[in-house]
Image (tube, helix red, strand yellow):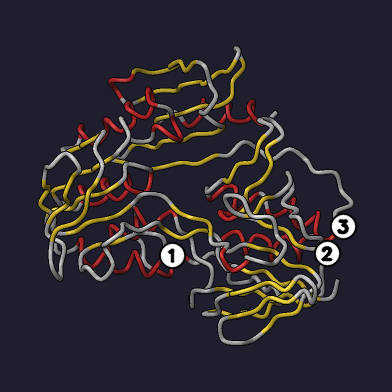
Amino acid sequence: MRTVAVVGASLAGLSAARSLRGQGYDGRLVIVGEEFHRPYDRPPLSKEFLAGTLGEADLVLETDDEDLGAEWLLGARAVGLDARDRAVRLADGREVRADGVVIATGAAARTLPGSEGLAGVHTLRTLDDARALRAELARGGRLVVIGGGFIGAEVASTARALGLEVTVVEAAPTPLAGPLGETMGALVSALHADHGVRLLCGVGVKGLGGEKRVDAVLLEDGRTIPADIVVVGVGARPCVEWLAGSGVDLDNGVKCGADGRTSLAGVVAVGDCANWYDPRAGLHRRVEHWTGARERPGAAIATLLAGGAVEPGVPRPPYFWSDQYGIKIQFAGHAAGADSVTIEEGAAEDRNVLAVYRRSGLPVAVLGMNQPRLFTRLRKQLAA
């Protein structure tokens, strides 16, 4: 294998490049990134960077002594993959021919229909998004967060600490019901009420008010919520449109085996766009977490370099964390499918708990709120 192209220059792409060199690949390495920035850390964007306690230099993922010997093509958007010629086509007309391709194009924030061009409306996915939102939050005012997922919750927490009046609108009965289940989702989201954030659940958003700049969020039940700033946090879609017609099997992202192999030989996928097979559950899952983007590329690169001649292992259960209102929230595993969840340490009213999710009596997930030691121990047991 003389040339490998990594398409995507965020954490997953960088991790794949590091794995290539770490596993002995010494050929030509081309890294294509749509953004003009070198790889940077995304989790602080909704927390320390947004609050102004971290600068852009603190987000850089590469170390001073790191030399991947890569050709970086930044500000270059992939628009197609020619499987026959093994060529990645770029929007500017260039092509990158490669013997192996790593798809790491990530995901893009979903937007609210009708919000295009309306000032004061933000999504938060990239460094440029965070720059723009940080400048607005610095002016203060009334913030409405649409979507009570982890990004929305972290933005709400940060904005509240900055002194803004904050409302969170969530269409589901409780925020975080998807990743945590309704019981624990309600417990974690109660942090908003603890800190003076207004939480509106079970109601959808009809639209936004304002001509040139947003001034209100219009709810489906007829209520109007005044707003100076709106953050839309309603999930992300995998960036795989550029692979249409390539022969790569697409299904909620790039459909992969348990080691990132795709339907095309010599092509693997990692990160937020990759829908990996989970042998434990017997189904495919797309994991949009920092830890997966760092850990899973090693297995994918081993498969790529071996030409698929290695047996896929079992990916570690997904893990993510969130910092909200000074509380560290950690979660590992999958809440979906659990038939019970019990608090085994701490007290819900203290927001200091360890909860275990079980299916047929066996642990399938664990949630910790300010319980790092016990959480880490049980997380290791899940992966055993």
Reading the image, the residue beneath label 2 is 24
**Residue at 55% over, 60% down:** 106
**Residue at 69% over, 55% down:** 249
Q: Are marks 3 and 2 in contact (CB under 8 Å)?
A: no
Quadrant of res 73: bottom right
Reading the image, the residue beneath label 3 is 306
Q: Secondary structure at mark 1?
A: helix
Q: Position of residue 190 (x, y in %)?
A: 27, 30
In front of the other: label 3 or label 2?
Answer: 3
Q: Are marks 1 and 2 in contact (CB under 8 Å)?
A: no
Q: Secondary structure at mark 3?
A: loop
In front of the other: label 1 or label 3?
Answer: 3
Q: Position of residue 41 (x, y in %)?
A: 48, 60
Q: Mark 1 or mark 3: name the one nearer the start of the chain.
A: 1
Give the Cα distance between marks 1 and 2. 30 Å
Reading the image, the residue beneath label 1 is 58
Q: Is residue 308 left or right of residue 314?
A: right
Q: Position of residue 336 (x, y in %)?
A: 52, 28
Specify the farthest residue to the front. Answer: 245
Q: Amino acid at mark 3?
A: Ala
Q: Mark 1 or mark 2: name the one nearer the start of the chain.
A: 2
Specify the farthest residue to the right. Answer: 309
In front of the other: label 1 or label 2?
Answer: 2
Give the Cα distance between marks 3 and 2. 12 Å
Quadrant of res 120: bottom left
**Residue at 43% over, 64% down:** 58
- For the residue pair 235 and 25, the one nearer the viewer reads as 235
Q: Residues within 10 Å of mark 3 (few under 14, many from 20)?
A: few
- For the residue pair 168 and 26, the one nearer the viewer reads as 168
Q: Position of residue 348 (x, y in %)?
A: 33, 20
Q: Residues within 10 Å of mark 1 (few under 14, many from 20)?
A: few
Q: Residues within 10 Å of mark 2 (few under 14, many from 20)?
A: few
